[in-house]
Image (cartoon, rainbow, N blue to C red):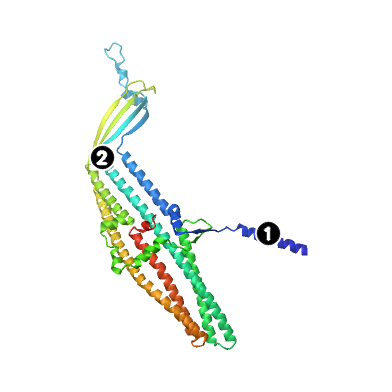
Amino acid sequence: MRFKWLIFNLMFISSTQTSVSAQPQIEQTLITMEEAISRALQMNNQVKASEYAVERANWNKKNAWTQILPVISLNSQYTWIDDSTFALRDFSRYFQDPNLPFRIQQTVFQSSFFTYFNLSVPVFNLVLINRISRANIGQDMAEDLNESTRRAIIFQVIGGYIHVLKQKDIFNLQKEYLELSRLNYEKAERLYEAGRYSKTDALRWKVDFQQQQSVVTTSQSNLRSGRIVLSRLLNAKQGEFFKVENRIPSELLEESERLLQLGDMELLALIQMDDEKLREVNADLSAAKKNENLSLSAYRNTYNSYLPVVDLSYTYGWQENKTINLDSYSPKTLMVNFRMPIFTSFQNYTQLKSSYYEYRESQENFYDKLLNLRYILTETVNKLINLKTQKELSRIRLEFNERNYRIVEQQREKGLVSNIEFVDAKLNLQNANLDDISNYYDFITGMVELYYLLGKLQNILEL
């Protein structure tokens, strides 16, 4: 029995080790903000897709140029006609008398071959020329969209990185208060059992301890969610986990300190620029303007459908007879084709009106995006102004609550304050710490958002 029990234990341990080793290993990587941005610009799917869109627009531009170049084709055909049709079309059989002063060559064969080269050149076709213009605009728009995507990813990575740092600090702070609440709760339980605390005082500390446990759980979930968002931006693989370095680049910290020194009107002056300048600095707005230009070009192109089209075609072929020797005659044909639309069942007119309203739609979308950007810029600056004031207020509140907590703690040891007053002082200090952490990171995030909208973010970080 002992032997069987030993064998069972060995099998159980072996199966447990096998199941543990079969679990996917989590690879933890410490990453800085600069490294996170670099990885996102290389690995993020949105960035890759926008880069492919630029390549596609580039080849579309080349394709538009090829439309006005000559086209040469080699064509070969074989024809067979039935006996009755052949008899009706072949007149040479009626002139077979050798006494006739002339001889008619046979030109119709029941089986015939015809091989020829054909050269086609567009001479006058404004639709093709306008297509080149549209392809150029499309390439510019794709490049602007690519730049807009890159800037958006940089902004999201920086914001996600700062959010993780913020949640880490909040989580660590909450854990400290949880430990403090646990010690106070255990002390209250001992005092209650010793008859020095009432049941109400002991329950008060128990409620505080339970609240801190709930807050810590929520903070840990927020931190986990922040890491998931950042990992998604970095295209993390299965089992890959990123640990952020507890450091914000000095360039961002120095710039945030500079903004803190600016007055309210100086902050508002940062966004005072005309429409053209704003379009130049904001890649997303620039892309929207290119889309408007593209719609305008498409609208103008519909007028070209009313114009004539001239093509030049030259054909050089070999023989048409019952063999494939190609040793008879070589027909040469030069043809100028002139096409002028007279009535197209209102197809051109309906297409013209559709293109016009498509252009007006893109125009309104551009101005809506412009006004929306100005609104967001104003809201961002207002947020910075408020955060600047709150940051100073939270610093003073933190200093006050730290001093007040130390005083209340000393008075509590002497029995001069109640248990509830001490808990309130602790909660006030905790909230002051949380406000200070939030205002610190929120101001940096607001500055990052402002510079992202103004197209200055990559200049600060020298990306």
Q: Nearer the viewer, residue 39 or 262?
A: 262
Among the two numbered marks 1 and 2 on one chain, the one whose residue lies closer to the N terminus: 1
- Tell me the residue at 52%/85% (across/down): 413
- Tell me the residue at 27%/60% (across/down): 273
Q: Which residue is mark 1?
A: 14
Spot occupied by residue 240 in the image (x, y as percentages of width and height): 52, 57
- Separation of marks 1 and 2 at Cα, in angstroms: 79 Å
Residue 436 in which image quadrant: bottom left
> Considering the image in quadrants, where does the C terminus appear?
bottom left
- Tell me the residue at 47%/70% (across/down): 170
Q: Which residue is mark 2?
A: 125
User: Exactly how many numbered labels are in the figure?
Assistant: 2
Instruction: Determine crowd level at label 2: few under 14, some 14-19, many 20+ residues with C-alpha closer than 10 A.
Output: some
Q: Amino acid at mark 1?
A: Ser
From the viewer's perspective, is 342 left or right of 191? left
Q: Nearer the viewer, residue 324 or 61?
A: 61
